[in-house]
Image (cartoon, helix red, strand yellow):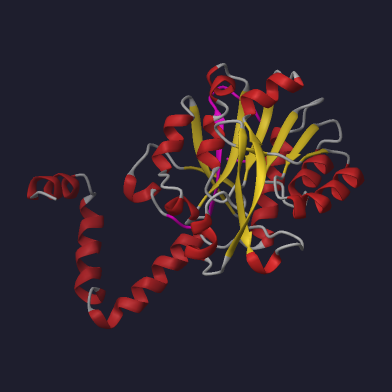
Amino acid sequence: MSNGQQTGRAANTPLPLRALVRIYVALFGRRAFYRWNLGLARLALYGMGFGSPTGSRISVAEERLLKNLVASDAPCVLDVGAYVGEYAARVRRFCPGAKIWAFEPNPATFTQLQKAARRDGFTAVNVGLSDRSGLTQLYDYASLAGNSGSVHATLYPGVIDGIYHREPADVRVEVTTIDAFMESERVTHLRLVKIDAEGHELAILRGAKRAIASGKVDVVQFEFNEMNVISRVFFRDFYEVLPGFTFYRMVTDGLVHIGRYRPRTHEIFSLQNIVAIRDGVNFGPGLI
């Protein structure tokens, strides 16, 4: 970084904050306080919605989101990477009239998803979503071969062996696109698309290019985390694939607007739940 860039950034920082930073660095910017600073940084990230979520934190924020966004006569909802159907069941609870499709390509997990679909009244689809249609490899823990699948099943073997340091095993699965699915099922509008695909979220949204461009998708909820290092996806890519959407991060009691893209505030590869809402979409108060 040039001295000019450093000076320019410093000039944009309020004077009281610059003074506080200088004092803090003078006191605590030494080797003896490195672990202290690391701990504070981790605590701050948890407070901003990063890191492994607690069930209560996610449930409260997600419930508020669902109450605001699916409370219409018969909204169409896609649960992509449904696993055993907990999210789809939650949508059904808040909106009895919703049309819900839950996608899960893992054949081992799909058996459990089908049971939940019959119990909670949604449609289970044994297909994955991507930016193309066809066959591909799905990877999961080799130790689970022939048994129930895990929440970490992914299209990237590096997620299993590089992040979780376990031996991967693969199975051949079918994938399609959101655009192709909407055409085949004659779905004209999607109120909510939830995606939990272990690093494949961007490709799935690229497979909804026509729907997004024509304003047929209102809200997208997706995870951004360390799996995106494996899939080589930046947060900036989501801004590009979702033009005309405003981005929020899920925190304890709702959503926080994360504003204009900045690398140092957005490219944090730690678990976070992001909600992108198409500009002009209306929802109830108390969420943002």
Q: Which residue is found at the position 25% from the left and 63% from the top?
A: 20
> Can I make out residue 187 in this image?
no
Whether residue 70 is visible here, answered yes or no, is: yes
Residue 15 at x, y percent in the picture: 20, 52
Question: Residue 175, relative to residue 50: is it above or below?
Answer: above
Magenta: main secondary structure equals: loop
Asked if residue 141 lies left or right of residue 2, the reply is right
Q: Quadrant of residue 108?
A: bottom right
In front here: 158 or 242?
158
Residue 87, compared with residue 141, is above or below; it is above
Using the image as rendered, state which of residue 97 and residue 113 is in the foreground.
113
Q: Nearer the viewer, residue 111 or 189?
A: 111
User: Is residue 40 magenta-colored?
Assistant: no
Q: Which residue of the protein is positioned furthest toward the right in this rendering?
A: 119
Front-most of residues 12 and 194? 194
What residue sits 46% from the left and 37% below the top? 238
**Residue 30 location, quadrant:** bottom left
- Residue 200 falls left or right of residue 233: right
Q: Residue furthest bottom?
A: 32
Identify the residue at horizontal 75%, vertical 50% (top origin).
107
Q: Position of residue 232 (x, y in %)?
A: 41, 47
Specify the quadrant that holds the C terminus.
Answer: top right
Count of numbered marks: 0
Residue 252 in percent (x, y) is at: 60, 55
Q: Is residue 97 above or below residue 184?
A: below
Looking at the image, the residue that sits furthest to the left is 3
Image: magenta residue range:
269-288
